[in-house]
Image (cartoon, helix red, strand yellow):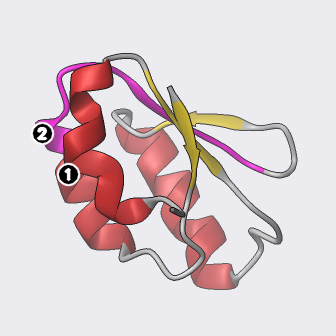
Amino acid sequence: MNRKLKSNADIPALLDRVNQCRGEVFLHTPYKDVLNLKSTLCRYIFAVLVAKGTLLGPCLLVFSDDADAALLCDFWEP
C-alpha cells in the first residue's frame, strides 16, 4: 500500500511509528530514490534531506504490511 506523505508531517514521530510497524516501510522521493525507513542509514539520509529542505515535491510512504496502515495514517494526505 502507498500513500502521499504530508508536507508538514512530524518526522521524529513518523520515525518512532515506523519502529512499531511489523513490515517494511519505504519512502519514495521525488528523485526516484527509495529509502527503507527501518534502516538507520536511510533514516539519517532522510533526516538530512528534511533538515536541508531538499525534498522538493511529494514523497510516498510505501509499506509492505497493510496492518501498519493504522500506525501510519496520521502522516499521509487524506
Is 27 contained in the magenta span? yes
On residue 30, the disc is none
Residue 53 horizontal side relative to residue 47, left or right: right
> Residue 34 at x, y = what percent?
67, 33
**Towards the viewer: 22 or 53:** 22
**Towards the viewer: 41 or 36:** 36
> Residue 14 at x, y = what percent?
31, 60
Q: Quadrant of residue 18?
A: top left
Asked if the residues shown at circle 2 and circle 1 are in contact, with their CB atoms under 8 angstroms apart, the answer is yes
> Residue 62 at x, y = what percent?
52, 32
On residue 17, the disc is 1
The residue drawn where x is 68% and y is 54% is 59
Q: Tell me the crowding category of disc 2: few under 14, some 14 to 19, or many 20 or more residues within 10 angstroms, Cα based.
A: few
The residue lying furthest to the left in this view is: 20
Amino acid marked by disc 1 = Arg
Q: Tell me the crowding category of disc 1: few under 14, some 14 to 19, or many 20 or more residues within 10 angstroms, Cα based.
A: some
- Residue 20 vertical placement versus 8 (above, below): above
The residue that label 2 is drawn on is 20
**Residue range (magenta):** 19-29
The residue drawn where x is 60% and y is 76% is 7
> Residue 71 at x, y = what percent?
20, 46
What SS does tag 2 mark? helix
Amino acid marked by disc 2 = Gln
